[in-house]
Amino acid sequence: MTEDEVLAEFRASEALLEGHFKLSSGRHSAHYLQCARVLMDPMRASRLAAALAAKLPRELRSAIDTVVSPAMGGVIIGHEMGRALGKEAMFLERPDGTFGFRRGFGLKVGEKVIVVEDVVTTGLSSKEAMKAIADAGGEVLALVSIVDRSSGGVSFDVPYHSLVDINFPTYDQDDMPAALAAVPVTKPGSRK
């Protein structure tokens, strides 16, 4: 799937939004990718996950035992990645502010895991998820996401693969352009 095809999926589902958005990372942007909208169509979610799985090196695909995603954003794409890879998929939650396994989910010591996200901007949630997996005894082999919004500004201790790199500018509260600051802010993400 090409970058244009991925963006066409976002446009077709009205998931590429414009305005003033406060992202889950705390940064501000004039653009927001509402992955929940793009993933609400099961066939579209399946296509995106299959395309993302196809980007992974064969050796990595064969080494994966389990797919783990951080809730909320990664749950649907993580489930679809599990389907595409033929692996079980589970998710981490933050009932007390820190990622952990619930609902009977857990890992065996040494279990090989791929972390699946919808969007990576600062990488903070991904790193928190990887720590929770390591604390549970798992070994993270790689991180994957539909969208990389980091503009190359984030690195991980494992390989990172995304379906598309989108470089919409993001801003700290104190360095926003005046035109963006003048637009009422919306916080559409899963963390309020």
Image: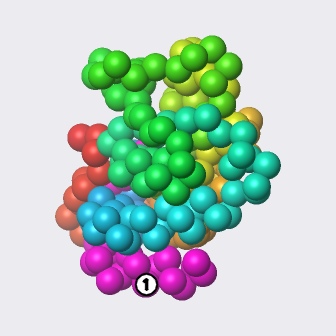
How many dots with numbers?
A: 1
Q: Nearer the viewer, residue 72 or 96?
A: 72
Residue 77 position by quadrant: bottom left
Look at label 1 and name its amino acid.
Answer: Ala
Q: Which residue is at 45% across, 39% downward?
A: 89
Residue 170 located left or right of residue 186:
right
Residue 72 visible in the current orientation: yes
| Residue 75 falls left or right of residue 164 | left
- For label 1, the crowd category at 10 Å Cα-Cα, with few meaning under 14, some 14 to 19 and many 20 or more, is some
Q: What element does badge 1 sit on?
A: helix
Camera-side residue of 60 and 70: 60
Residue lying at 35% horizontally and 70% vertically, measured from the top left? 43
Compared with residue 3, is residue 88 higher up or lower down, i.e. above or below?
Answer: above
Determine which quarter of the picture holds residue 13: bottom left
Report the quarter where the N terminus lies.
bottom right
Q: Which residue is mark 1?
A: 8
Tell which of 144 and 79 is nearer to you. Answer: 79
- Report if residue 124 lies within the magenta region: no
Considering only vertical position in the picture, is 122 above or below 102? Answer: below
User: Which of these two is toward me, 151 or 74?
Assistant: 74
The magenta stretch is: 1-25
Q: Farthest residue toward the front?
A: 86
Left or right placement of residue 175 versus residue 154 in this view: left
Residue 11 lies within the magenta run: yes
The percent coordinates of residue 44 (x first, y second) are 37, 71
